Amino acid sequence: MEKIPFIKMQATGNDFVLIDNRNGLISGTEYSRLAKSVSDRKFGVGSDGLILLQEGKVEGTDLEMIYKNPDGSDAGMCGNGARCFVRMASNLGFDMNRISFHVHKNVYTGKINDENIEIQFPLDTYPEELKIDGDSYLSVYTNTEHIVCQLSASDLTDNPSLVQKGRKLRHHPLFAPIGTNVNFIHGFSDKQLVLQTYERGVEDLTLACGTGAIASAVAWHSYQQLPEGDYIIKVKTKGGTLIVYFTFHSSNKIYNNIRLEGPAVTVFEGTYLY
């Protein structure tokens, strides 16, 4: 039985188990199995995913972030998890003003702004319109797969309906074989919206989704056909408010200079008996 030190953290209600794996205690072949075990809310610690902090393998980076969903699958990128990762790295002594890390080959930077943490995304993206069963959606890639759907304020509170629709869309053949994350939004001003996300790998609504907040902010800007420029959009989730920054270029419809800001809080520390 391995004794694995861990930290439980949450970022706007998205909760994670984080492990400092710079000593190589957890091998790559164990990532998925450990994620399933530790994320279980009855038989494990309980979380929306497992994050491993490792020495950076890409030139110019301090660290590598490994992220696995509760079902053991790869999530691509997790914005809320990245903020927890940066908080943990800062607590381990890394520069709180600029922490460079990679997820797969994509290089991100993070910094701490008082209570909040800001993540810079290496991303140029654009919304693509989709028609599924007669309904319109926008697909927005944020280094992981997302689609966005507009709903009325009342429909956004109907959780059973959102779960049913989210599950159906997440497994739609159009997104095979890996599926997609599904974001339901309602905008209540030009720069503010409410969001609920059905997350692939969690297979349920979560209290917040960082990459989903980025996708939703970009989609909301696109839906409104706002002009080019720099934007700050506040995204309200059940777990709290996230702030998305981006620049829109009307000449090529590209969104870049993307940053995600929000809190990341340590809940407790412990030892997991694996």
Image (cartoon, grey):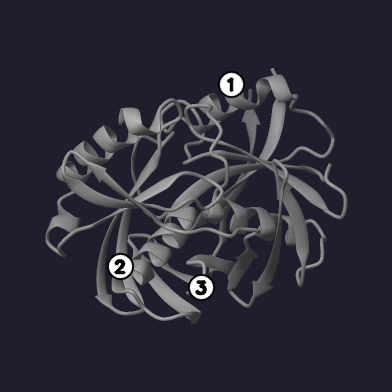
Residue 233 quadrant = bottom left
Q: Is residue 7 left or right of residue 160?
A: right
| On-image quarter of the N terminus | top right
Among the two numbered marks 2 and 1 on one chain, the one whose residue lies closer to the N terminus: 1
- Measured as percent of width and height from the top left, residue 152 is found at 15, 62
Q: Nearer the viewer, residue 222 or 75?
A: 222
Q: Percent position (x, y) of residue 24?
A: 82, 31
| Residue annotated with mark 1 | 33
Q: Position of residue 200 (x, y in %)?
A: 41, 37
Indicate which label's residue lies in the foreground, 3 or 1: 3
The quarter of the image holding the C terminus is top right
First along the sequence among labels 3 and 1: 1
Residue picked out by circle 3 = 251
Q: Nearer the viewer, mark 2 or mark 1?
A: 2
Q: Front-most of 35 and 46?
A: 35
Seen at 49% across and 54% down, the residue is 211
- Total number of numbered discs in the rendering: 3
**For residue 120, above or below residue 251:** above
3D distance between C-alphas at marks 3 and 1: 46 Å
Instruction: Give the side of residue 90 with respect to residue 156, left or right.
Output: right
- The answer to whether marks 2 and 1 mark residues whose Cβ atoms lie closer than 8 Å is no
**Among numbered discs 2 and 3, the one appearing first in the sequence:** 2
**Looking at the image, residue 107 lies above or below residue 219:** above
Front position in the image: 147 or 64: 147
In the rendered view, would you say 57 is above or below 89? above
Residue where numbered disc 2 is placed: 223
Task: Point out the residue furthest to the front here.
Answer: 251
Amino acid on which disc 3 is placed: Ser
| Residue 171 in sight here | no
